[in-house]
Image (cartoon, grey):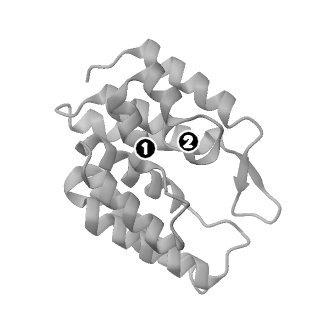
Amino acid sequence: MQYDIEKIRKAWEWATRAHKGQTYGGSRQGEKIVYINHIGSVFMEVSHALSRHPEYDAGLALLCAVLHDTVEDTSITINAIENEFGKRVADGVGALTKNENLPTKQEQMEDSLDRIKQQPKEIWMVKMADRICNLTSPPYYWDDFKKEKYRKEAMMIYHELKEGNSTLAERLKDKIIAYGKFIGS
């Protein structure tokens, strides 16, 4: 598994600064989790898969794992990512970024998946890892309708990207099944 640790460290610093102050809802009433935890979780999932599949470009996968939400959730631009980390990383992050000009969440997801599928498999890995992490437990304030909708979206991600990496595909499938325990509880 080859990668430039200094580039990964720089990307982590960028993500930490960019997501500063951002939180997401935890599974307990009123709980707020610092957003960089999500970035670290996605990074760990991708790292785990790379350890089992050394044939992938670890540098590309890990950089995109760290930066995957920066354009969507912060003021960092694709151009800034390209200038600092190169076109391949910028293209990967761009594909992982939803086009919020599309009218519905469904259309945004379908468009993103189409763009991800035009990228190297390392980008597919990041999307599967992202959803694996998001299926750990739903925010305390989601109702069953939202949970089921999210689970169905995860199934779509699985079906579209499962050929990207067998380790992550299996983990995503298991998380989708396990997520059912949160619905109707």
**Left/right of residue 107 with respect to residue 69 in the rendered view:** left
Three-letter code, disc 2: Val
In which quarter of the view is residue 162 placed? bottom left
Residue hosting label 1: 94
Pinpoint residue 17: horizontal percent, then vertical percent: 68, 28
Residue extending furthest right?
A: 30
Instruction: Please rate how many residues cluster around mark 1, counting C-alpha atoms within 10 Å: few if below 14, some from 14 to 19, many from 20.
Output: many
Residue at the (75%, 63%) spot, across then down: 28
Residue hosting label 2: 71
Secondary structure under badge 2? helix
Per the model, the C-alpha gap separating discs 1 and 2 is: 8 Å
Pinpoint residue 82: horizontal percent, then vertical percent: 43, 27
In which quarter of the view is residue 160 placed? bottom left
**Left/right of residue 62 with respect to residue 170 in the rendered view:** right
Q: Name above or below for residue 179 compared with residue 93.
A: below
Q: Name above or below for residue 104 compared with residue 92.
A: below
Secondary structure under badge 1? helix
Mark found first going from the N terminus, 1 or 2? 2
Q: Name above or below for residue 69 compared with residue 179.
A: above
Residue at the (61%, 67%) spot, across then down: 138
**Left/right of residue 64 with respect to residue 168 in the rendered view:** right
Q: Are marks 1 and 2 in contact (CB under 8 Å)?
A: yes
Quadrant of the rendering where the N terminus is positioned? top left
Q: Would you say residue 174 is visible in this rendering? A: no
Give residue 182's mark: none
Quadrant of the rendering where the C terminus is positioned? bottom right
Of the pair 107 and 1, the residue shown nearer to us: 107
Three-letter code, disc 1: Gly
Residue at the (46%, 21%) spot, across then down: 83
In which quarter of the view is residue 55 placed? top left
Q: Name above or below for residue 181 compared with residue 167.
A: below
